[in-house]
């Protein structure tokens, strides 16, 4: 993975216009598959109809050297009431449809597990089952806090977290050879940037807190922070 490409995002955006969302994504070092909750792309909604994402067709019109896609994770679906088997089946189908026809030399795949610390399931085993089926760079995005040593001992290569709230560098198994995707609001949120790490916002921009005028401003913030850590 090209270590000079460091800016990407979680996925959800406050747009309703597909082309506007995809065009915005393409401005990042690592373009990401946009999800538009205002058009039904909230993760617990889209998984009811695997592969049905507003921006997927438009996104696949482009060719990428490195790209990021994402899917709701199995622990999150089990927390939402799905059985283990159904969770894995739906995730497999959703990812398969995302990857089919996607022209990219390298693909980062994040599983979104917002409240993983409260799941109470063997998430490492579930992740292994899913990632073993796809030729991708495996990663996970976690919004909340947890025992991060458990994630450091997993098989994912990239860990995405909210660095504006939590300090994962204090854990005994910190790094363990993994890349970190720093979810930041300011430069000071990044405690230990290394080559291969990424920079994103702390979470997605799909909530009602954001409007369509916000994304360009946040991208400029990420670019400024990236410039500072790359010096």
Image: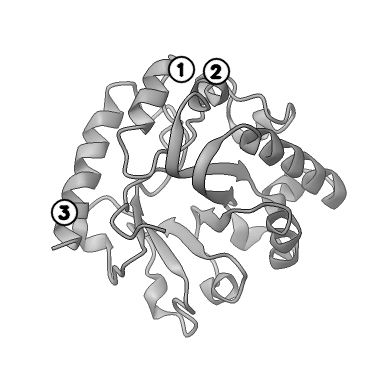
Q: Mark 2 or mark 1, which is nearer the start of the sequence?
A: 1
Q: Measuring 46% from the left and 57% from the top, which residue is drawn there? A: 160
Viewer-nearest residue: 228 or 150: 228
Q: Farthest residue in the bottom direction?
A: 172
Q: Quadrant of residue 229?
A: bottom left
In the depicted structure, whether residue 2 falls above or below residue 148? above
Rendered image: mark on residue 227: 3
Q: Are the residues flagged by discs 1 and 2 in contact, CB closer than 8 Å?
A: yes
Q: Mark 3 or mark 2, which is nearer the start of the sequence?
A: 2
Rendered image: mark on residue 94: none
Q: Measuring 57% from the left and 34% from the top, which residue is drawn there? A: 102
Disc 1 target residue = 18
Where does the N terminus fall, quadrant-wise? bottom left
Element type where label 3 sits in the image: helix
Q: In the shown orientation, is residue 170 left or right of residue 94?
A: left
Where does the C terminus fall, quadrant-wise? bottom left
Viewer-nearest residue: 112 or 176: 176
Q: Which circle, 2 or 3, is nearer the viewer? A: 3
Q: In the shown orientation, is residue 9 left or right of residue 230?
A: right
Q: Are the residues flagged by discs 3 and 1 in contact, CB closer than 8 Å?
A: no
Residue 77 position, x and y percent, is 72, 45
Element type where label 2 sits in the image: helix
Distance (Cα) linking label 1 and label 2:
9 Å
Residue 71 position, x and y percent, is 61, 42
Q: Measuring 21% from the left and 62% from the top, which residue is drawn there? A: 188
Q: Measuring 29% from the left and 68% from the top, which residue is drawn there? A: 193
Disc 2 target residue = 39
Q: Mark 1 or mark 3, which is nearer the start of the sequence?
A: 1
Distance (Cα) linking label 3 and label 1:
29 Å
Disc 3 crowd rating (10 Å Cα; few below 14, some 14-19, many 20+) is few
What sort of colour scheme is used for the picture? one colour
């Amino acid at each position: 993975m090209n270590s000079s490409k460091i800016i990407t995002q979680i996925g959800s955006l406050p747009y309703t216009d597909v082309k506007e969302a995809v065009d915005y994504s393409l401005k990042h070092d690592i373009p990401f598959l946009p999800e538009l909750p205002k058009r039904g792309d909230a993760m617990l909604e889209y998984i009811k109809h695997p592969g049905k994402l507003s921006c997927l067709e438009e996104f696949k019109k482009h060719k990428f050297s490195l790209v990021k896609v994402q899917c709701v994770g199995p622990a999150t679906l089990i927390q939402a009431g799905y059985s283990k088997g159904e969770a894995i089946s739906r995730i497999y189908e959703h990812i398969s449809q995302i990857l089919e026809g996607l022209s990219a030399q390298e693909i980062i795949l994040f599983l979104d597990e917002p409240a993983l610390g409260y799941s109470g399931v063997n998430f490492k085993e579930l992740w292994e089952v899913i990632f073993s089926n796809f030729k991708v760079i495996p990663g996970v995005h976690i919004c909340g806090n947890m025992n991060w040593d458990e994630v450091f001992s997993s098989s994912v290569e990239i860990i995405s977290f909210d660095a504006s709230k939590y300090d994962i560098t204090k854990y005994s198994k910190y790094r363990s050879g993994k890349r970190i995707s720093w979810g930041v609001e300011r430069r000071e949120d990044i405690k230990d940037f290394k080559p291969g790490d990424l920079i994103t916002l702390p979470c997605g921009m799909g909530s009602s807190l954001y409007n369509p005028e916000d994304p360009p401003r946040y991208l400029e913030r990420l670019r400024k922070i990236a410039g500072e850590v790359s010096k």
